[in-house]
């Protein structure tokens, strides 16, 4: 038969598609499936139970195989990887592309991935249902283990086609193994077919279903997209008990990590490279940042096999606290501060109606639930108590942070006065909070905002709060 479709990486690899006769496949229908799905093949093997369309015909004892279900009990993708004599016994056989499932579809709704993932419970069944790929070595109950969400939160919700399209657009440039991509693509295309959207063979990007995502800057600064905002200091050879240190001073990313596969991978790679699976220390002085980045960092740190000690040198505020509580042991300078608050969004010169703000409130509530998950794991405080602490914008000195369970130990030796970065954006952000401790305010050496600007900001805050509460503002 003529060859069709994409080839395997090279002739040292092999893959095949198996069609099970019990599911009703024939030689004709299975061949047509290969042609319709742009699948390269150069031969057919048949036995009593299956048709196997193969790519190349290597010596089978040189390969280790793993299976990925494209359609359960119907179509199976068999991937072959060369093995060496030394590595043959240790090679893992894993499934990472989540099998195709046929569900209801939603072709109208906008896609808000962060909201749907934040609303989802830390439940393997739900998370697997919502996504198209999972890291087989990750924690199945952790959201960071999964990629390419496209279902609304739940285990019986429709596939949102705009989420499917978004995932397909990111797939070619993602950091998942190349061998996993056909299974992920098959999963996503099946949802489009269920929605009555027949795909022509070839790249969806060429059909301009969606545009390439560019990182979104969230905070003022000079960082480039995907540039690490963490630095490493190696252990001191003259001090046998010293550990590699990661320094997190400043924003938790000036850019959002939403739809960013590059920055999380860099963070994880650096953690395992410098930590080498052993104990590490993270030193922190951060006023917050992107909550999506903080959430992913929390998951990556908790999954790291070595002991992680977090030392808060100055301030851990807002999203930075989500990173801090991931440590196995969290320590805090006697002069430092720990602050938690409800998630917020800043907007200027934007006309937002009640519907916009109501939708925004729903997204913020979902994000809050995700943040409370991290706090609850660390502190064992009840969710109502945590919710109130966040709503009240709670600033804690070291002793109160210990009492509430957010940290484990107060560092009392060699304290230094609190020092904040001299950055206008940081100063403005901190002065926007209502309960900033005097010691922190004193560290803000200047006041970039005029009294009029403060009054205008307060009026805007009150206006937004009144609408979110569905109350009429005072005339």
Image: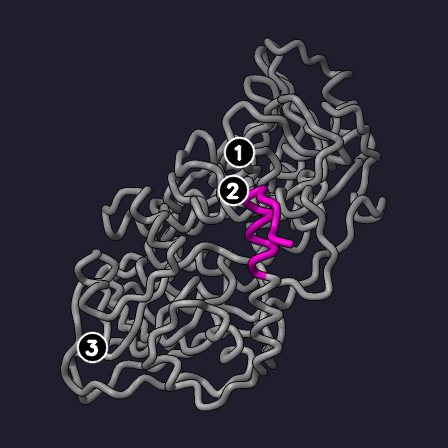
SS type, badge 2: helix
The total of numbered circles placed on residues is 3
Pointer 1 or 3: first along the chain = 1
Residue 281 lies left or right of residue 127; in this view the side is left
Local packing at callout 1 (Cα closer than 10 Å; few below 14, some 14-19, many 20+) is many
**Quadrant (top left, top right, bottom left, bottom right) of the C terminus:** bottom right
The residue most toward the front is 475
Residue range (magenta)? 461-475
Tag 2 and tag 1, C-beta contact below 8 Å: yes
| Res 112 → quadrant | top right
The percent coordinates of residue 68 (x first, y second) are 54, 32
The percent coordinates of residue 344 (x first, y second) are 52, 57
Q: Which residue is mark 2?
A: 117
Tell me the residue at 32%/55% (across/down): 302
Q: Which residue is mark 1?
A: 153
Q: Nearer the viewer, residue 229 or 398?
A: 398
Q: Which residue is mark 3?
A: 334
Tell me the residue at 41%/78% (across/down): 249
Residue 464 magenta: yes
């Amino acid at each position: 038969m003529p060859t069709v479709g994409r080839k395997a990486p090279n002739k040292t690899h092999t893959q095949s598609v198996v069609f099970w006769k019990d599911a009703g496949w024939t030689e004709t229908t299975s061949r047509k499936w290969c042609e319709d799905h742009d699948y390269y093949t150069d031969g057919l093997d048949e036995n009593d139970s299956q048709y196997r369309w193969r790519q190349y015909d290597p010596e089978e004892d040189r390969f280790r195989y793993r299976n990925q279900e494209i359609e359960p009990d119907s179509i199976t993708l068999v991937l072959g990887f060369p093995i060496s004599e030394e590595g043959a016994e240790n090679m893992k056989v894993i499934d990472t592309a989540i099998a195709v499932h046929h569900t209801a579809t939603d072709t109208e709704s906008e896609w808000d991935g962060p909201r749907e993932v934040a609303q989802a419970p830390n439940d393997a069944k739900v998370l697997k249902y919502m996504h198209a790929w999972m890291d087989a070595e990750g924690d199945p109950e952790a959201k960071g283990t999964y990629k390419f969400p496209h279902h609304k939160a739940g285990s019986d919700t429709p596939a949102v086609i705009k989420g499917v399209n978004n995932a397909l657009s990111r797939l070619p440039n993602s950091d998942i193994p190349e061998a996993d991509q056909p299974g992920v693509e098959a999963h996503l295309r099946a949802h489009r077919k269920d929605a009555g959207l027949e795909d022509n063979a070839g790249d969806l990007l060429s059909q301009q279903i969606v545009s390439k995502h560019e990182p979104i800057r969230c905070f003022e600064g000079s960082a480039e997209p995907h540039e690490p905002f963490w630095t490493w200091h190696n252990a001191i050879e003259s001090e046998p008990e010293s550990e590699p240190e990661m320094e997190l001073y400043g924003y938790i990313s000036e850019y959002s990590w939403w739809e960013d596969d590059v920055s999380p991978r860099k963070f994880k790679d650096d953690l395992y490279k410098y930590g080498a699976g052993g104990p590490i220390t993270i030193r922190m002085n951060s006023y917050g940042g992107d909550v999506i980045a903080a959430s992913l960092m929390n998951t990556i740190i908790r999954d790291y096999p070595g002991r992680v000690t977090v030392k808060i040198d100055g301030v851990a505020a807002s999203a930075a606290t989500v990173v801090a509580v991931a440590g196995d042991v969290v320590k805090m300078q006697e002069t430092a501060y720990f602050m938690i608050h409800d998630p917020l969004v800043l907007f200027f010169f934007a006309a937002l109606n009640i519907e916009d703000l109501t939708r925004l409130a729903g997204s913020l509530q979902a994000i809050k639930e995700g943040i409370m998950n991290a706090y609850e794991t660390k502190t064992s405080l009840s969710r109502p108590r945590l919710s109130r602490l966040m709503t009240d914008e709670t600033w804690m000195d070291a002793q109160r942070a210990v009492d509430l369970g957010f940290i484990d130990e107060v560092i009392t030796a060699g304290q230094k006065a609190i020092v904040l970065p001299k950055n206008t954006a940081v100063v403005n952000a901190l002065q926007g909070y209502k309960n900033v401790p005097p010691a922190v305010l004193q560290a803000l050496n200047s006041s970039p905002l005029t009294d009029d600007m403060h009054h205008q900001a307060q009026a805007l805050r009150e206006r937004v709060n009144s609408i979110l509460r569905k109350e009429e503002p005072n005339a």
